[in-house]
Image: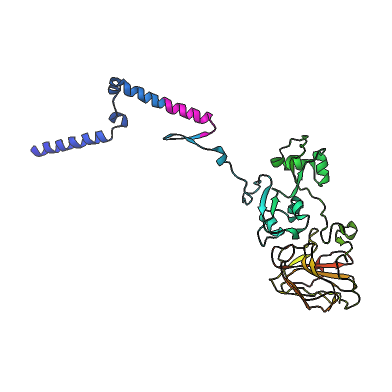
């Protein structure tokens, strides 16, 4: 009997403990009677509740407060959370914000910079005419380039311009400016831009200005099928050069490497940049007579020009050293210079041009396969 009684006492103690532990928070907090007996505590609780409610309402109404934490509203500077334009974004169709700037680094090429931003090299020339004048050889380290958000034209509006006249000038449509360019131009259909405003013309284009010699002595001609034409091609050349070796009519590669390192042939670059290390030998592409050997101020640096006596000339630019002189006969394969980076160049390579009766055809059309 004593044993049963002791068990009942133990069971009662356990049940009592469980009931206390499992009681809801309200049962363990102050009771209603206690709160009624302490009106000051009740008033403070109501004031805290009203303060939190008022803070939340202010957070909604005040654009500078958009978060509320345990310590109250969290102040956030909205300018610091606006996404910045990212020229390297990997999200398809995400547009960059207007025109940004890029500082040219040593070794950069126009094609390389254009590829970095997903643009065509033509677009970079059009957007930076004041600096490059349609001549990629004017590119140099520390130059600051304008980088448009899309392929096309960046244009500063002049007095009297209309969207329609601008579109016609740059071979685009008004819709390209209003619709495709709305992200940057912010023009409603029919609205005209103000003088001095900068417009993005997606898909716009213009003719390139010749740079091969000088603007006064050169131009492009439509009657050659778009092949650039060099006017007065003897300007600055050696004097009283005549006769000499005549070319075979076939060409060899003028450098040991047979691939590009820089710009390919284009309307704005009527030659090819062939890979070469500083000091590598440069070879005569065919038999001929040296008609230019020396410094050139048009961007070629140390330049050698060979006349092959059959309507062809070959040009070799950016050399670090020249091994031939005016009037010298050279045979195909003769070493005429050493590769370099003189003139307008961002790294060692050979700028190679082929010219036929004053035109500048693509060298790849006459060179043997690599």
Q: Does the rendering let one see residue 364?
A: no
Is residue 56 magenta-colored?
yes
The secondary structure that dominates the magenta segment is: helix
Counting from the top left corner in percent of width and height, residue 57 is at 49, 27
Asked whether 346 or 81 is in front, the reply is 346
Name the residue rendered at 79%, 63% in the picture. Answer: 297
Q: Which residues are magenta?
A: 50-65
| Residue drawn at (34%, 23%) of the image | 42
Q: Is residue 82 above or below residue 115?
A: above
Q: What is the quadrant of residue 249 in the picture? A: bottom right
Looking at the figure, which quarter contains the C terminus?
Answer: bottom right
Residue 51 appears in which quarter of the rendering?
top left
Judge whether residue 186 can be spotted in this image. Answer: yes
Image quadrant containing the N terminus = top left
Residue 189 shown left or right of residue 14 in the figure = right
Residue closer to the observer: 190 or 320? 320
Viewer-nearest residue: 42 or 357: 357
Does residue 85 show up magenta in the picture?
no
Q: Position of residue 84 (x, y in %)?
A: 60, 45
Q: How many marks?
A: 0
- Residue at (50, 31) in percent of width and height: 59
Image position of 53 with respect to 361: above or below: above
Residue 3 position in % (x across, y down): 10, 39
x and y percentages locating residue 82 in the rendered image: 58, 41
């Amino acid at each position: 009997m004593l044993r049963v009684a002791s068990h009942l006492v133990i069971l009662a103690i356990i049940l009592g403990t469980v009931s206390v532990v499992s009681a809801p928070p309200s049962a363990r907090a102050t009771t209603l009677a206690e709160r009624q007996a302490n009106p000051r505590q009740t008033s403070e609780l109501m004031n805290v509740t009203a303060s939190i409610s008022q803070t939340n309402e202010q957070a909604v109404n005040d654009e500078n407060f958009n978060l509320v934490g345990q310590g109250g509203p969290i102040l956030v500077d909205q300018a610091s959370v606006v996404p910045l334009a990212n020229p390297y974004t990997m999200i398809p169709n995400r547009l960059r914000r207007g025109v940004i700037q890029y500082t040219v680094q040593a070794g950069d090429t126009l094609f390389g910079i254009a590829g970095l931003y997903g643009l065509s090299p033509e677009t970079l020339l059009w957007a930076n005419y004041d600096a490059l004048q349609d001549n990629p050889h004017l590119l140099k380290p520390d130059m600051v380039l304008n980088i448009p958000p899309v392929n096309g034209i960046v244009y500063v509006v002049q007095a009297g311009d209309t969207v329609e006249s601008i579109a016609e000038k740059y071979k685009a449509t008004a819709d390209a400016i209003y619709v495709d360019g709305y992200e940057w131009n912010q023009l409603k259909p029919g609205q005209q831009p103000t003088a001095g405003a900068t417009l993005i013309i997606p898909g716009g284009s213009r003719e390139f200005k010749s740079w091969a010699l000088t603007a006064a002595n050169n131009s492009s001609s439509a009657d050659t099928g778009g092949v650039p034409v060099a006017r007065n091609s003897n300007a600055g050349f050696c004097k009283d050069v005549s006769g000499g070796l005549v070319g075979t009519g076939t060409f060899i590669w003028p450098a040991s490497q047979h691939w590009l390192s820089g710009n390919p042939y284009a309307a704005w670059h009527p030659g090819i940049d062939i890979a070469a290390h500083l000091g590598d030998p440069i070879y005569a592409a065919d038999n001929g007579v040296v008609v230019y050997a020396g410094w050139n101020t048009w961007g070629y640096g140390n330049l050698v020009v060979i006349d092959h006596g059959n309507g062809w000339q070959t040009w070799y630019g950016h050399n670090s050293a020249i091994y031939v002189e005016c009037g010298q006969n050279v045979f195909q394969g003769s070493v005429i210079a050493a590769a370099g980076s003189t003139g307008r160049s961002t790294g060692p390579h050979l700028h190679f041009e082929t010219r036929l009766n004053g035109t500048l055809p693509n060298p790849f059309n006459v060179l043997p396969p690599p």
